[in-house]
Each structure stands twice: as structure tokens, then as C-alpha cells.
Amino acid sequence: MPRVKNMFNAFFQVIVKELTGAFRHRSDILNPVWFFIIVVTLFPLGIGTDPALLQRIAPGIVWVAALLAALLSFERLFKDDYIDGSLEQLMLAPYPLAWLVSAKVLAHWLLTGLPVLLVSPLLAAFLALDINTYFALFLTLLIGTPILSLLGAIGVALTVGLRKGGILLSLIMLPLCIPILIFSTMAIDAAAYGQSYIGLLALLGAMLIAAITLAPFAIAAALRVSVS
Amino acid sequence: MLHCNMLTAVREDRILFKELSFIINPGEIVQVAGPNGVGKTTLFRLIIGLSSPYSGEILWQGCSIFEQRESFHRQLLYLGHKTGIKPELTPLENLQFFHKLHVTEEDVDLWHVLALVGLAGYEDVSTAQLSAGQQRRVALARLWMNDCPLWVLDEPFTAIDKSGIKVLQSLFVKHAQRGGMVLLTTHQDMTINSSLFRKVELQHFAAGEEYV
């Protein structure tokens, strides 16, 4: 039992350290959210404010913007730790690496996915979404953004040792995110037409569960390759 | 007991050293010596299990380290070139993290530990604002607050002043006398006159211009 307690303690300590560090560098949290808001607001400015048109393209806009904002924030997931040596120390901690990186990914989601969820009502207003459609958007973001964090972490873990890993990361990451994008926008579209979208959400949920159970092992393995 | 058995390391197809074997017994301080580029850091990363050797094996208490990663890491303290100290956190927060992550049995007074390494009064300053030597001292403070038998220290004296080096050397001797093991590299002259201390010259195992 003490072993289990120690493991949860380690998990918690990693999250606390990540959050404390992030709150010292507030721009790291705020910049991706600002980026998300600005990208979404550019569309009504660029293509006009016709509510019917905006409603039609809103799911795609919000999801692509969320994807790009997530991409911006991935760099800080392991890069700083790699540079200052904390990553090595994390790998030398007496706990399974997959467990500790899960804590890091959860902290990353709390710092980047959660703020996107929190500002989403504002964007719903920008894009003239009705309440049902917005609710579907919120649910897909709630289920989808953790998958983005987990998939992104694999990409970051693979590219962390490279000097210019940023663009490579996007090339690895974006194709992997296509299924999430498709099912999320389908669910939101279904909601907009008043149809049931629970099946699509269930599919997203299945992807999330698969990602939670499998991605940490992939991240850990990728880190062992990158750091060696 | 740490046993390196017939280790060969390769970097970019070039053999750095080959068939390196040595044993560290409890109560020994071993300095790995050799000129720059001979493979000291590479050897250390093999020993702590961050990378795997081209051939050969590393045994801890008679068992390969890869078969008992967690229990080996519980007994290992490694300080590398990169210290693992977060610049945006304060020295105290950094130590708290390591202390709580490794959950040692005894309760350590972290303020006292920081005072021991000469950082009294700097507990609440962000580590980024400290000098290079002081940042190094934050990392070295971990030596005072662990019960790991094996210390692997890559250039621990970098940026540390003379009196600091003396304090560290006496700490190594104390650790060895308690039955601990210290493995370190340094280009400074070690002034430990003790039967506990010995050197491994890595150059004797260097392979010259051999490729795989």
C-alpha cells in the first residue's frame, strides 16, 4: 500500500511543480489562449458577419483554432525540462516513467486545454452559435482536448532532442489529429441540425480512453529514445 | 556494489572506450579521469541507465540495472552537467520537489540544508537570479538530503569555489565511511588522502580510431 501512496504522491508532486512553474511564467498559459481567441475572431472579420454562414463553419473554425493553439503550447511540455536537466531527473525517479509523464500531460491540459474550454462561451457568441450547438461544441472540446495533449506529448517526446523540432512536430501531430477533428465537427453539425450526437461523442470518448491508456507508454518510450 | 562488465560505448560509429570493467564496493570513492571527449559523461549515462551500452552490462547488487530500474533508481542520486533545477522556482521549492518525490524516511529540514550550502537568505529568490555557482549549490544541496547509497556526480565542482570544494570532498568521505559509494568526474585535483579513494583512468580503455 505505501507503494501506491508514494506513486500518487509523486504524481501530485509533478503536477504541483508544473503548475507553480507555469504561474511564474503567465505568458506561457495566456499566449495560446490569446492565439485561440484571435484566430477565431479573424474569421468573422474576414468572411463577413452573416450569422447563417458563421454557424455553418463555426465547428471547423473553433476546432482548427484549438488544434493550432495546442500545437503552439506543446513545445513547453518537455523542451524546458530537457534543456535544464529536469527531464533526466524525472527519468531517474524511482517510479514508472509512463506514470510521471501522465502527470505532466494532465498538468499541460490544465494549463492549455482548460483555458480554451473556459473561453469557449465567448467564441460561441462571436460565431452566433445557439445554445444546443454550443453545448455540443463544449462537450467535444472537453473530450477532444485531452486527446490532443496526449497525442502532442508523443510528438514532443519524439522531437525533444532535435534542435529545430517545431515544424517536424506539426507534421507528425496534425495528421494524427484528423480523426478527432472529423468526429468533433460531425457531432457539432449534428447538434446544429437538432439530431442526436451521442454516438459521435461516444466514439470520441473511446478515442480518449485509448489515448489515456496507451499514450503514456508511447511517450515514455519516445523519451527514452530521445534522451539517450 | 556496482559492477561494470566489459562495457563498450559507441558514439557516431566511433568506439569511445571498449571492454571497460570495474567494480565499486560500498565505502569507495572512485574518480573517473581522462581528457575531454574520452567518454566520461557517456560512461555515466550508461551507468545510470539513461542510455544502453553497445555491448557489456552494468550490474547493481549482481542484477542488471535494466531489470530493476525502479529499485536501482531509488538508490541512485545523479547530478549531471545539467542540474535539473528549475530556474523559475525558488531554491526551496526545487528542494521540496526532490524531497517529496523521493520520499525519504527521515524528515529533513530544508532550510538547514540550504544554509549548509551557503544559500541562507536566498530561499525565496527565484533560482534564475542566482549566480552560476549558487545555482550549482542548489543542485548539490540534494547530497545532504538523501539516503541513496550510490552517488554519480558528473563534474560536481563546476563553478564551485575552493572552500565549497573542500566541504564537498569531506562530505564524500563521510558518505563513503557510512558505506556509500561515490562515482565522480572532475578536472580538479582531489585532495582526499584516503584508502577510500581511487582513480579509474578511462584513457587506458580508449580505442583510438576504431569504428564499428
Image (cartoon, coloured by chain):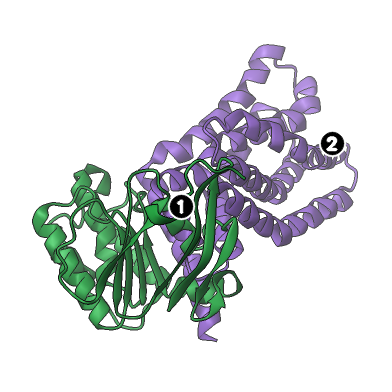
Contact between marks 2 and 1 (CB within 8 A): the answer is no
Separation (CA) of disc 2 from disc 1: 55 Å
How crowded pointer 2 is (Cα within 10 Å; few <14, some 14-19, many 20+) is rated as many
Of residues A3 and A114, the one drawn nearer to the viewer in this rendering: A3
Q: Chain of mark 1?
A: B
Three-letter amino acid code at disc 1?
A: Thr
Residue bearing the label numbered 2: A189
Q: Does dot 2 land on a helix, a strand or a loop? A: helix
The residue sitting at 14% across, 63% down in the picture is B191
- Where residue A50 sits: x, y (%)? 75, 17
Q: Residue furthest left?
A: B163
Residue B152 sits in quarter: bottom left
The residue sitting at 71% across, 51% down in the picture is A143
Q: Is residue B129 left or right of residue A155?
A: left
Q: Is residue B205 left or right of residue B83?
A: right
Label annotation for residue A135: none
Number of marks: 2
Three-letter amino acid code at disc 2?
A: Asp
Q: Is residue A182 left or right of residue B186?
A: right
Instruction: Tell me the purple chain.
Output: A
Instruction: Tell me the colour chain B is drawn in.
Output: green
Residue bearing the label numbered 1: B42
- Where residue A123 sits: x, y (%)? 63, 32
- Where residue B62 sits: x, y (%)? 52, 80
Mark yes or no: residue A15 visible. Answer: no
